[in-house]
Image (cartoon, rainbow, N blue to C red):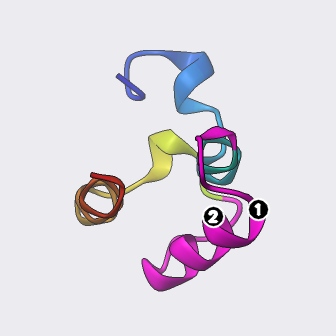
């Protein structure tokens, strides 16, 4: 979906994580650090392994 939608694809991963229930700013930053995802990364810029790891942690 992020690859097809310019608005979604252009959204920062950090902003999406922070907007999720039970995930605040600190948890979002820790999660991204653990998964080696830059704080400036946008959804469209996530690699396959990063996307899979992020989805696995959020499941």
Q: Is residue 10 left or right of residue 46?
A: right
Q: Is residue 44 left or right of residue 21?
A: left
Q: Nearer the viewer, residue 15 or 58?
A: 58
Q: Is residue 6 left or right of residue 54?
A: right
Specify whether residue 39 is painted magenta.
yes
Kindly identify which residue carries mark 2.
Answer: 28
Say which quadrant the N terminus sits in: top left
Specify whether residue 33 is painted magenta.
yes
Residue range (magenta) = 19-40
Query: Which residue is located at x 62 percent, y 18 percent?
Result: 7
Q: Nearer the viewer, residue 40 or 32?
A: 32
Kindly identify which residue carries mark 1.
Answer: 25
Query: Which residue is located at x 48 percent, y 49 percent?
Result: 45
Query: Which residue is located at x 69 percent, y 66 percent?
Result: 39
Query: In this picture, is 10 found above or below 47?
Result: above
Indicate the position of residue 41 as horizontal and vertical percent values. Answer: 61, 57
- Residue furthest to the front in view is 22
**Number of callouts in the render?**
2
Marks 2/1 in contact by CB < 8 Å: the verdict is yes
Q: Nearer the viewer, residue 46 or 25?
A: 25
Tell me where residue 57 sits by quadrant. bottom left
């Amino acid at each position: 979906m992020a690859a097809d939608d310019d608005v979604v694809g252009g959204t920062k991963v950090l902003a999406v994580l922070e907007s999720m229930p039970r995930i605040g700013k600190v948890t979002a930053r820790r999660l991204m650090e653990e998964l080696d995802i830059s704080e400036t990364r946008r959804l469209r810029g996530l690699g396959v392994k990063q996307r899979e790891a992020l989805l696995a942690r959020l499941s």
